[in-house]
Image: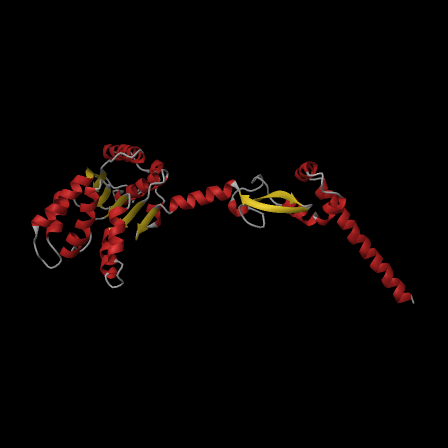
Amino acid sequence: MEPIQSAMKNWMKSNERIQQTFEDRRRSVLNDPDIKQFLSEHLELDEEAINKNLMKLYEFQNASKNCADCPNLEGCINIVKGYTPHLGVENQHVSIRYEKCKNKIADEDEKAKEALVQSLYMPSQIKRAKLEELNTKSLERKEVVKEIIHFVQDYSTGNFHKGLYLHGPFGSGKSYILGVIANELKKYNIPSDLIYVPELVREMKSSIKDDSLQAKIDRFKKVPVLMLDDIGAESMSAWFRDEILGSILQHRMMEDLPVFFTSNYDLNQLETHLSTSNRGEVETIKAGRIIERVRQLSKPIELYERHRSDE
């Protein structure tokens, strides 16, 4: 008989603890300011209904609301990260709907802007380039910053503005400047493609095999702002010069779509480079046509000094 009595006492104590826990939790939930406000607006919820919906109210109580306690999206404590809870009621049944919080919206906006800058074989440092970190000690760099600001302002308001042909020695910050321009454009939701030309040549050759060549050419023809990094560093074939580069630049010239270039060559040197194919053929007229399109699409600026902070 003694074991039965002992078991009964333990059960009753356990049951009392459970009941006490329930009452403490219920009291805490009902004293929550947001929940008190909600219940005051829904007097149809009687005692029985409140008890039935206590778990929903408890979930709401423990969720982060209005991002007040969230330093960022990763720090969100809610069941669904980036979504804040809102209580509703229908037929004495409490429901919770989750809506995007300000951190979630900001994160999605940033990702959408990041997607505006498409790069092909460009280093991550270039993709993170910022205007405020651009070295502006020399006169030509001050001119570059002025051109960037004017270009972005004009383009964002629908006015055509030439791109830039930035030329100078290795390490003078040419590629970094392209990254700056791309990131300034994305602030205005303007898409751009930033492409390392030597890899573009190989990409186009390989695209012949999988029938994606024309689709890629069309993309580079039509992207709002095209940036060609290190033109002249590639081994140039007549096919790439005339059928790919020439076709893209011709379309963009006709449609007033700007192009930015960087090169170790000035325009005269680039013309010499383009006139000689990798087979040793010399075609000055065809090279001249490419250079004329480059001139129509961009303004040459020479960078003289080496700047480690840029490139």
Residue 143 lies left or right of residue 73; in this view the side is left
- In the picture as drawn, the residue positioned furthest to the right comes out as 1
- Taking depth in this image into account, of 103 and 144 the one nearest to the observer is 103
- In the picture as drawn, the residue positioned furthest to the front comes out as 91
Percent coordinates x, y for residue 75 in the rendering: 54, 46
- Taking depth in this image into account, of 60 and 194 the one nearest to the observer is 60
Percent coordinates x, y for residue 281 in the rendering: 8, 56
- Taking depth in this image into account, of 166 and 25 the one nearest to the observer is 25
Percent coordinates x, y for residue 100 in the rendering: 52, 44
Q: Quadrant of the N terminus?
A: bottom right
Percent coordinates x, y for residue 248 in the rendering: 21, 49
**Residue under the image location 70 percent in, 48 percent down:** 53
Q: Report the colour scheme.
A: secondary structure
Q: Quadrant of the C terminus?
A: top left
Residue 297 lies left or right of residue 111; in this view the side is left
Residue 149 lies left or right of residue 54; in this view the side is left
Is residue 185 in view from this perspective? Answer: yes
Q: Tell me: residue 237, above or below residue 136.
A: below
- Taking depth in this image into account, of 76 and 272 the one nearest to the observer is 76
Is residue 25 in view from this perspective? Answer: no
Residue 248 lies left or right of residue 186; in this view the side is left
Q: Give the total of numbered labels.
A: 0
Location of residue 292 by image quarter: top left
